[in-house]
Amino acid sequence: MNDPVPAELRARCPLITAEAANRLRAMIEHPDAPPWDYFCGNRVIAEDLPGLAAFAAALAKPSANDDRVSGSLLQTLAAAIPRTPILRRLLPPAADLERDWQDLPTTCRADLAAGPSDWIPDDADWSRLVCHGTSGTTGHPIIVPHHPAACAAYEPLYATALAARGVQLRFTPDRAACLLLCAQRRTIRYATVCALWDQGLHAKLNLSASDWPQPGSARRFLADHDSTVYTGDPDAFAALLQLADTGLHPQGLISTAMPLPPALAERLEAVFGCSAVDIYSLNETGPLAWRCPQGHHHILPPDVFVEVLDDLGQPCADGVRGEVTVSGGRNPNLLLWRYRTGDRASLRRDSCACGDPRPRLIDLEGRAPVRLIAADGGTVATVDVSRELRRFHLLRHRLVQRPDASLELTVLALPGDDPPVDADLALMLRNLFGSLPMTVTVAGHDWGGDGKVPSYASEMP
């Protein structure tokens, strides 16, 4: 019998139904659709579904993890060593993973950048390899080897984060399942379907006015698809607020890539009447933690071991800041081995007032710490600056210390809010840094760049 789904689409989305294919075609041909310039699919096959179902079931039973690697993860890692080039080179042949764990080598982004294929097991099915390019906040591009099932696992991870806020997602054929929003000068645009969310429509859209065929197109397109879930970064959600009168009724908003300012989260929840959840996610790990109402990031996936290490690679005591380091995961093409993310936080395993029993990261800050110098020669921690900046309703900030120790702070206010007063920001800096020369700029809606801009930088020798 002839397959009603076009062969090219079936190859990209093997499990797509004829009904979903018709809905996807209607989205692509919508009169207000953006100019699609990329084609992709979830590539999930029937053999992937039992593992994904088991992963979703494990997510639904959160538990407090101890400070030791689980036996099942140790077995998985041990089995991967003889099959994975980088692990064969990295680890001593006689290493006892359980006994020697804290003294075993770590890996980092540079190791992945130097040879992505070295992380792929010898017996991997290369026909199912998915490659994701990412630059992160460092600006150094890397290729992350992925697998279709690992990509599809984003869906139960997002659903679990929303469930922690009391949201039980319900998908219906008359609306999109998930729209990924951007607010950039340029990015790819595509339409496909979600593998596990009832083959619901999914699209990546850029809310920049120049990306749409005519004025009002974005409003009409979003209104006609009224997505169940929106994902994006704070810039994209700030742009979505400008379209709030479109009559959208999302069940949940998921922010990734950059920290979601609490003031923006409150505004989104008030305007759209749903939970806005901040997710800590890396391309290498997938969604890793969700930020609870206490401001702590609880570890989501049960198949990873998260530790916080000092500069010598030794575990920090609970509550002591260090580098977030991850082992394990569900990506068979990139099993992470003590992978130092470059992000900084402290780890706590005691109970949290929010009720989530999972371990949590405290005062999470992206990428390597920047050493900022005060007028008296002492150092100022970036986390302390971030805490002070939370008093202002900001979408973004960037603080740069120039070679002469002068400070340049640029901030972007939340849309619709009165911008912060320059003098108030300068006073905050003086309280932290003393009498250094400083410049404070409240930017307009154009930040002057796309993607993840590091919040802190130092040019001091």
Image (cartoon, helix red, strand yellow):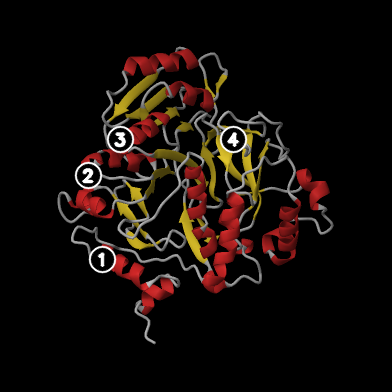
CA gap, disc 4 and disc 3: 29 Å
Q: State if disc 1 and disc 3 touch (CB < 8 Å).
A: no
12 over 456 or under it: above or below: below
Determine crowd level at label 3: few under 14, some 14-19, many 20+ residues with C-alpha closer than 10 A.
some
Name the amino acid type tagged 3: Val
Determine crowd level at label 4: few under 14, some 14-19, many 20+ residues with C-alpha closer than 10 A.
many
Name the amino acid type tagged 2: Thr
Q: Which residue is nearer to you in this view: 439 or 186?
A: 186
79 over 419 or under it: above or below: below
Helix, strand or loop at label 2? It is helix
Res. 361 mark: 4
Q: Where is residue 254 in the image (x, y as percent from the top left)?
A: 42, 44
Q: Earlier in the sequence, mark 3 or mark 1?
A: 1
Q: Position of residue 202 (x, y in %)?
A: 36, 58
Helix, strand or loop at label 4? It is strand
CA gap, disc 2 and disc 3: 11 Å
CA gap, disc 3 and disc 1: 29 Å
Q: Earlier in the sequence, mark 4 or mark 3?
A: 3
Q: Which of marks 4 and 2 is nearer the N terminus?
A: 2
Q: Which residue is nearer to you in this view: 145 or 243?
A: 243
Determine crowd level at label 2: few under 14, some 14-19, many 20+ residues with C-alpha closer than 10 A.
some
| Residue found farthest to the left | 215
Q: Position of residue 296 (x, y in %)?
A: 55, 32
Q: Which residue lies under the disc numbered 2?
A: 246
Determine crowd level at label 1: few under 14, some 14-19, many 20+ residues with C-alpha closer than 10 A.
few
Res. 26 mark: 1
